[in-house]
Image (cartoon, grey):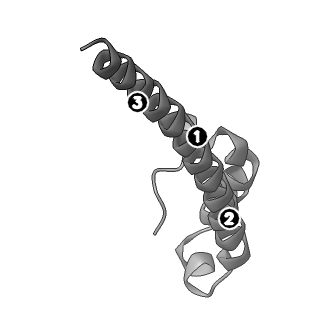
Amino acid sequence: MHPHLHTKDNRGCEEVMQILDECHAQGFLHKVIGGCNNAKREVNKCLRAERLERTARNREEAKRKNEAIKAVWKEIDSNS
């Protein structure tokens, strides 16, 4: 399973998602016999890379916010 494909977070994977959609449009039997497996793997790789980039950005932003909060608390403690 994969998350919802066409979201704002997955814009970098539009091309591979389009290939998968086209493969799925070829019919149920084509999907069942594994005709879309390579396209699915490529979508999974792309989505994973997008998620890892997003996670790294979120982690860095959280570190900056935590440092700012610590600085505010340090200032409050020094003024008390």
Give the x, y percent position of residue 53. 65, 49
Q: Which of 77/31 is in front?
A: 77
CA separation in Å, label 2 and label 1: 38 Å
Q: Mark 2 or mark 3, which is nearer the start of the sequence?
A: 2
Type of the residue with mark 3:
Lys
**What's the residue at 66%, 78% (across, down)?**
37
Tell me: residue 1, above or below residue 60: below
Q: Name the side, left or right, on which 16 lies relative to 25.
A: right
**What's the residue at 46%, 56% (across, down)?**
3
Residue 54 sits in quarter: top right
How many numbered callouts? Answer: 3
Q: Mark 1 or mark 2, which is nearer the start of the sequence?
A: 2
Q: Name the side, left or right, on which 44 lies relative to 71.
A: right
Q: Which mark is residue 43?
A: none
Type of the residue with mark 2:
Cys
CA separation in Å, label 3 and label 2: 52 Å
Q: Which residue is mark 1?
A: 60
**What's the residue at 55%, 83% (across, down)?**
32
Q: Which residue is mark 3?
A: 70
Q: Which mark is residue 23?
A: 2
